[in-house]
Image: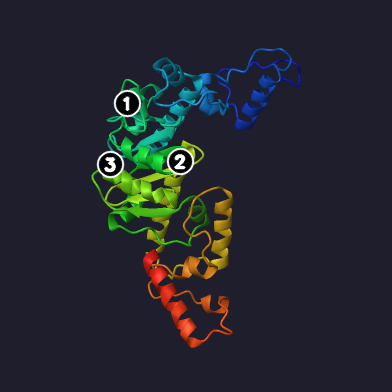
């Protein structure tokens, strides 16, 4: 239509592909092409859906900012787009049966010590942008008509402990939660996506919503972005956005399902070699994700796991210089190494 000089007049029932939408967006940024009617797609309300980039407010807000400023921010198109993102992720969590009843909650850091979060007692399947709450980092509600989630303290403690965490997502996906009930992190070195996107730790059980629960989870965020909460569920964080925190849920849940099935096939499970795993960890590091295995020896990455007891790091002997060491010195080195390894467990 544009090439033919007809302008942009998209019929109401047209399906606009993502690339067409980008093209229309560029056209609009260029001043509306040939001066024709504006495309019907880039409404602020549909900002997230259309992929329009909305920028955060120029001034960083905090819990002490004047109420009027907080209110104006909370009703801005930017805040609206974040609320819509939370709703969209909530709907995905519900459709995938990762949440039950009113379970699951999410938060996005929007200032030094403030966050937008989901309300309590609302199914993630029917979340609406106007349901969202604004809280300070102590969990006090600043804005929003619905009451904030009772599990907000954990999200806030994660954000306080891990300055990189901009978004957090918590839910109860059944397969991953099964591992949390068994109190074990899934075995590693089997699927690339899982290794790159998730770093999984297990936090001990505490009453949901308690400060103690939040503290134990938060302490793991230095090294892990996906935390199994024993006898409860899973919580993830992202340094990018809420969708990435949500992706981690899909990835760990698919992984846990896959390995449960793989374990039933009656065939030995193949795992990555050390060098293969090292390559994945290099990718992971370049993406800015955390992982406690960065810097470990290749042979330690997949061959010495609690999941496969008795398997030891076979190639470590070849890596270590042995020439010129007397037996006593070697014994001392071994004793110290063993002590360090025991402390790391
Ligand atoms: Zn929960």
Secondary element at tag 3 = helix
Give me the residue at 25% from left, 41% from top. 210
Crowding at mark 1 (Cα within 10 Å: few <14, some 14-19, many 20+): some
Number of marks in the rendered image: 3
Give me the residue at 49% from left, 56% from top. 195
Quadrant in the rendering for residue 133: top left
The quarter of the picture where the C terminus appears is bottom left
Give the spatial CA distance, label 1 vs label 2.
Answer: 20 Å
Tell me: 123 left or right of 75. left
Residue behind mark 3: 211
Quadrant in the rendering for residue 32: top right
Residue 107 appears in the rendering: yes
Tell me: 307 left or right of 11. left
Q: Would you place residue 68 above or below residue 186 in this image? A: above
Q: Nearer the viewer, residue 175 or 267?
A: 175
Residue behind mark 1: 141
User: Disc 1 beta carbon < 8 A from ligand 1?
Assistant: no
Residue behind mark 2: 165
Q: State which tag comes first along the sequence, 1 or 2.
A: 1
């Amino acid at each position: 239509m544009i090439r033919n000089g007809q302008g942009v007049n998209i019929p109401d029932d047209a399906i606009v592909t993502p690339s067409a939408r980008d093209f229309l967006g560029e056209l609009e940024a260029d001043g509306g092409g040939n001066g024709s009617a504006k495309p019907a797609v880039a409404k602020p309300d549909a900002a997230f859906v259309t992929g329009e980039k909305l920028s955060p407010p120029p001034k960083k807000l905090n819990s002490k900012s004047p109420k009027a400023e907080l209110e104006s921010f909370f009703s801005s198109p930017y805040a609206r787009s974040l609320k819509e993102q939370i709703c969209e992720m909530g709907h995905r969590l519900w459709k995938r049966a990762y949440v039950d009843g009113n379970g699951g909650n999410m938060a996005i850091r929007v200032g030094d010590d403030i966050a937008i979060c989901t309300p309590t007692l609302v199914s993630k399947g029917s979340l609406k942008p106007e349901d969202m709450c604004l809280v300070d980092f102590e969990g006090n509600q600043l804005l929003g008509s619905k009451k904030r989630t009772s599990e907000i303290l954990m999200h806030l403690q994660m954000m306080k402990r891990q300055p990189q965490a901009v978004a957090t997502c918590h839910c109860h996906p059944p397969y991953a939660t099964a591992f949390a009930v068994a109190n074990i992190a899934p075995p590693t070195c089997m699927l690339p996506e899982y290794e790159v996107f998730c770093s999984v730790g297990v936090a001990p059980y505490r009453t949901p919503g308690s400060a103690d629960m939040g503290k134990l989870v938060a302490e793991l965020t230095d090294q892990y972005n996906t935390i199994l909460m024993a006898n409860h569920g899973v919580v993830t964080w992202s340094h990018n956005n809420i969708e990435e925190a949500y992706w981690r849920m899909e990835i760990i849940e698919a992984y846990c399902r896959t390995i449960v099935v793989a374990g039933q096939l009656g065939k030995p499970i193949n795992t990555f070699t050390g060098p293969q795993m090292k390559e994945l960890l290099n990718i992971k590091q370049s993406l800015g994700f955390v992982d406690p295995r960065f810097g470990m020896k290749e042979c330690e990455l997949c061959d010495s796991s609690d999941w496969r007891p008795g398997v030891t790091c076979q190639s470590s002997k070849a890596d270590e210089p042995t020439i010129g060491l007397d037996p006593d010195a070697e014994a001392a080195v071994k004793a110290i190494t063993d002590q360090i390894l025991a402390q790391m467990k």
